[in-house]
Image: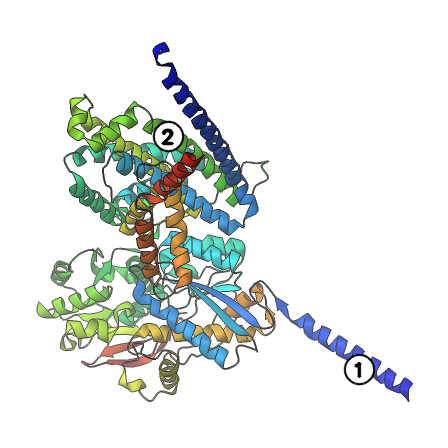
Amino acid sequence: MSRLFRGIACASLIATATASSAAFAQKKYDAGASDTRIKLGQTMPYSGPASAYGAIGKAEAAYFKMINDQGGVNGRKIEFISLDDAYSPPRTVEQTRKLVEQEQVLATFQNLGTPTNTAIHKYMNAKKVPQLFVATGASKWGDPKRFPWTIGFQPSYQIEARIYATYILKTVPNAKIAVLYQNDDYGKDYLEGFKQGLGAKSGMIVAEVSYEVTDPTVDSQIVTLKSSGADVFFNITTPKFAAQAIRKAYDIGWKPLHFLNNVSSSVGAVITPAGPEKAVGLVTALYGKDPTDPQFAKDPGMQKWRDFMAKYMPGADVNDFNHVYGYSAAQLMVQVLKNCGDDLTRANLMKQAASLKDVQLDTLLPGVRINTGAMDYFLIEQLQLARFDGKRWVLFGDVIGHE
Amino acid sequence: MSGKAPEAESAGAGTAVRAGLRLWAALGLLLVLALLCALPFLVSSYRTFQFTMALVYAIVLLGLNILTGYNGQISLGHGAFFAVGAYVAAVLMDRFGVPYWATIPASGLVCLVFGYLFGLPALRLQGHYLALATFALAVAMPQLLKYKAIEEWTGGVQGIVILKPDPPAGLPFNQDQWLYLLTLAIAVIMFALAWNLVHSRVGRALMAIRDHPVAAEAMGVNSAWYKSAAFGISALYTGVGGALGAIVVQFVAPDSFTAGLSINFLVGVVIGGLASISGAIWGALFIQFVPNIADQISKAAPWAIYGIFLIAFAYAMPTGVAGFLRLLWRRIARRG
């Protein structure tokens, strides 16, 4: 009897040992991950000229706190270290080295800014640490051949510009187009994408005028563009200048088919200051749900976002799209971590980020799905056109993807 | 001399004590140098990088101290010279394939000329007006760097990414350690040169102009020339620092050189100690590490914490860290 008992005990012991070792074999970790936690790092401009974007980092920290309160990702708590870089590239380098070498994070997530991410682009790829979902619209982040450890998030400026170009070719093939753009990498990225979209028809552009971000107004540029006789206007401007351009064009009686880039599509920050009656008929492209848009008042996804805001960011501005944006990116991050299962190596994290299939997020427009592949590092590649009706953006047509 | 035997005797005793102190000071300096050389092998790569940046700032602060501390000209525009130095190095490496070490003296020379030329019209400005003129330079610099006509070289807002230099073949260092040692070597040379400069005829002339401009002119000091030269030399130091900073950070962009950087430099000089060679080191440590400490204390309001540090330092050490240490040293010496 006792021998039998011992035999059973022995067998069960061996069984447990092999079972647990089998389970152990499946769990793989790189620096920053363990049975209990996943460490993510971030640099964000909490101070300095771009500090308005700090809201994104705060929303993301709050989202991860919510996930941790719900038990974490596959039982692991997310430890999120978000450091201030004041939008200064040397600070970004310093803080990123701190995150990678000292804090030993598994990956960085949503580092904000084009110059700041450029400063650490080579470093992250040399160190083979994932630079995930960078918060910038430049098109250089989708380059898996040269930079396999860096991946973007929002639609690139070029993708958006191509969508306008396709629409123009389809609906007004004989248009004479005027372009106003900000003279920096952002403006040029849009213009480049727009010309690519027009392809052989880029001769349709009859006037092309730029402004400096330091200029007081763009009034004279608008007058110049009007005198070119153009009947389509592509407005590549940041919010302050977008409002000026809309007002000036209306005031001097220029009524082209007016395309406004997504960067300045905020009703609160652009349309209201310009005067909503002057913006009727404007066309833009959207990918996220505007928190001020009444058509999403009962939307289940936005309801989840509102509950989150009420519970985890009480007192924060619920009209600020940055909070929607941060929520979207954090939700995607959690999804990718879930997909990693127990293989939390940097290589697998990158592999999972690059094998998303039809992922939908609470705060993205219905129909916008995220797809990536080993050679496709562009995440959100779909937008939907919308026309301003005097009060709000009215979506029309289908969600347009980029092929 | 022979008629003053008793006096000479007591002076002799004093000299012996002073010689003893000087020996200790020399030994201390050697010890500090040895420690500085050993540092990159004792701490992580990330810390080595931070200390390299501190050395870069020390060179800049030394240059600013020659102008502001020793010559009494306030500059709120040294971030601009720093930017010029960084861009000269980056453009030479990126566009013309110049090796990194050769860009450092080139940056220094360009800044020397630029600083001297800027010093000429600045001669007409005194005190606060000079501060404003230099501040204008600092404010304008990021936008000038984005200027269309030079975009082909500067890369516009995109900036320039620089490759991190490898240590010379055969040396058993990693890249961070090598950059640290290179920066340390250059810093030691620059400090030795600055020490010689301020203890020479030129240094005395600079201080005379600061303290009594009229008296200095009456003594035959060419005030205009010395002031412009001080600007040039100061810019040279800052340019060398800028080149090293660009190589260490591996990236230059207009956003790296905001007006805030220039103010930070002035903060460093004042906190470290005006008209003091060692003050540059203390000031550099302050501007490199205190923002990080502040960030660790409070995420919500790091700059408020930084402000508290600033006030605490200004209140507790009104002559800067170097002045405070000198005071301590004197007390010890008096007792000894």
> In the displayed structure, does residue B27 sit left or right of residue A58?
right
> In the displayed structure, does residue A331 sit left or right of residue A319?
right
At 36% across and 43% down in the image, what residue appears?
A: B324
Location of mark 1 (residue): A12
Extreme left residue here?
Answer: A252
Residue B110 rendering spot, x and y as whole percentages: 31, 34
Q: Nearer the viewer, mark 2 or mark 1?
A: 2
Amino acid type, mark 1 = Ser
Q: Where is residue A234, by image quadrant?
A: bottom left
In front here: A254 or A291? Answer: A291
| Vertical placement of residue B287 versus A269, above or below | above
Amino acid type, mark 2 = Trp
Extreme front residue here?
Answer: B6
Residue B50 rendering spot, x and y as whole percentages: 45, 49
Location of mark 2 (residue): B195
Circle 1 marks a residue in which chain?
Answer: A
In front here: B110 or B8? Answer: B8
Residue A344 rendering spot, x and y as whole percentages: 58, 68
> In the displayed structure, does residue B253 sit left or right of residue B138?
right
Question: In this view of the protein, can residue B111 be seen by the observer?
Answer: no
For label 2, the crowd category at 10 Å Cα-Cα, with few meaning under 14, some 14 to 19 and many 20 or more, is some
Circle 2 marks a residue in which chain?
Answer: B
> In the displayed structure, does residue A356 sit left or right of residue A208?
right
Local SS, label 2: helix
- To the question of a shared chain for discs 2 and 1, the answer is no
Question: In this view of the protein, can residue B181 be seen by the observer?
Answer: yes
Q: Are marks 2 and 1 in contact (CB under 8 Å)?
A: no
